[in-house]
Amino acid sequence: MTRRSLAVISAGLSQPSSTRLLADQLAAATRDELVRRGSEVQLHVVDLREYAHDVVNNMLTGFAPAALREVIDTVTGADGIIAVTPIFSASYNGLFKSFFDVLDAESLIDRPVLIGATGGTARHSLALEHAVRPMFAYLRSVVVPTAVFAAPEDWSDGTADGALRARIRRAAGELADQIERRPPATGPADPFALTTDFLQMLGRGDGPTVS
Amino acid sequence: MQFGIFTVGDVTVDPTTGREPTEHERIKAMVAIALKAEEVGLDVFATGEHHNPPFVPSSPTTMLGYIAARTERLLLSTATTLITTNDPVKIAEDYAMLQHLSGGRVDLMMGRGNTGPVYPWFGKDIRAGIPLAIENYDLLHRLWREDVVDWKGKYRTPLQSFTSTPRPLDGVPPFVWHGSIRSPEIAEQAAYYGDGFFANHIFWPKEHTQRMIGLYRQRFAHYGHGSADQAIVGLGGQVFMRRNSQDAVREFRPYFDNAPVYGHGPSLEEFTRETPLTVGSPQQVIDRTLGFREYVGDYQRQLFLMDHAGLPLKTVLEQLDLLGEEVVPVLRKEFDALRPAHVPAAPTHASLVAAAGGAKDSTVHAVDDVTGKAPEGATR
């Protein structure tokens, strides 16, 4: 049985948070789908709110405090990522963006990502396409085609049903597909690993590399 | 073991008074701090090199030459010399000159510099920082060891029959350290040459330092310079002391809260926990510093950052008194007692001369001593 890990990131600020609720439903649907296909799934849910100060400190000092370091390693070492943000001023909220800003820009390359968002009205839904998806394109992640937006009316029963539920199921299936196409993740990259030797750097091997 | 101080040379407002020193005051303060370092028995004074405000030390050998003339014993170093944007030929010449004038009291620490705009001002590109550091240092290394150099590279005009003068004092080049916070390539570079490796160590968690030093030691052994525990390691540190630790915390907090690097970010308590910063009594500084060896092994040089964040000169000089009188003598004794016999001390000019089999004058005369001919291509 293949072991898979899913990092579930919620940038919701209120408690309880509809963003977290959507993140949980996306996570459960993806987990169920992967389990149905024979994988063992470990879910890591991250409420960014709890790390808000650490994220800002990381931006100011250049290093992540220990608790945030652990979260970053979990996210960058996961097989798949579910990233959900509330839409503020026509885009992701600052906390969501700041978290991805402090990650190494190469740490999520080729990582399957499912994006979701919540907002005060359905008119915000395309922020997923014009703001959240391009950010992950920059990070060279693989964002599944279905992005999931939940407006207040989607929670009418206090739970997702109808169109939202169908959309969650479809997105979860797409994320599971992408995860299954890849070998299990080997954990976060080691930033201190030496990937060359000196003669190569000196140009007496393959020539100096300009990054 | 060597103990000393390193300075960035920043002009920073004193947050408790709102007063900002002039460049002139800051330059004079740096000299006063260096002289004090010798007076209180420290071994090393190292200056930064910067080419943009709010920093004053753009011309390190001018300052170090002046300090050399006013000191007897103090070892003069850099933290760091920009190996990326300086011409390696000029580094070879300037520091060989300083080596002669100071009687061999000079070594250097190479660094890349992380300020983007500085690179284009000197015709370089920060994205080529590592290749620049590799190529430039390789040339510098040859200029100090080969009397006549033919050289062609990517980042500088070629050299034909070039002799860097003056030749190193007693035929022995200054010892070189390489400083880097998180680039394994630089640890590899230091290991390849058997040079020293210096971990800045302040501002970042100790795990960074531990990983970088571990890599350097392993590669030092790989390249056959000795066992891993014989590699030459230096560490930075940052302290503020008063006899009563509560007084130290109270006095330092406004400087911490407004410091250019970490100000307005984590609290003093968080930063003290996450990094080697120690604010407290001399005994606390002693205990914390002795603890460094537990994660990097026995090491050769400890430099402290003492004059930053707008601390007034008077306070810095008081700090140096505490460092020199109460902290370093204990550290020296304790570290020496812990260090096994096969682990070397930091190289000095005297030890390098001895290792080379004695001093030899290495003057290159315009006419070749052996053949009676001028060096190839030389016009007389």
Image (cartoon, rainbow, N blue to C red):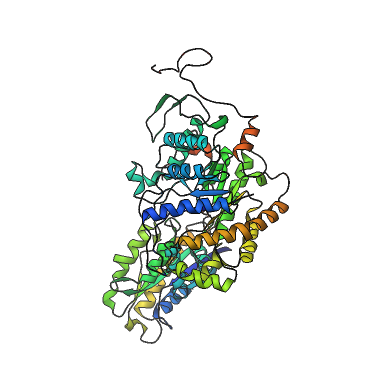
Q: Is residue A2 above or below residue B129?
A: below
The number of discs equals 0
Residue farthest along the bottom direction in this orientation: A157
**Which residue is drawn at the image coordinates 36% and 80% (left, top)?**
A162
Residue farthest along the left direction in this orientation: A123
Q: Position of residue A148 (x, y in %)?
A: 36, 72
User: Closer to the camera, B284 or B213?
Assistant: B284
Q: Quadrant of residue A155?
A: bottom left
Q: Quadrant of residue A166?
A: bottom left
User: Closer to the camera, A117 or B283?
Assistant: B283
Residue B339 shows up from this direction: yes
User: Closer to the camera, B73 or B125?
Assistant: B73
Q: Quadrant of residue B247?
A: bottom right
Residue A43 shows up from this direction: no
Q: Position of residue B135 (x, y in %)?
A: 45, 37
User: Closer to the camera, B108 or B201?
Assistant: B108
Q: Is residue B338 above or below residue A49?
A: above
Q: Position of residue B248 (x, y in %)?
A: 54, 70
Residue farthest along the top direction in this orientation: B372
**Which residue is drawn at the image coordinates 64% and 42% (left, top)?**
B221
Q: Is residue A141 above or below residue B346?
A: below
Instruction: Quadrant for the C terminus of chain B, please.
Output: top left
Q: Position of residue A8 (x, y in %)?
A: 46, 70
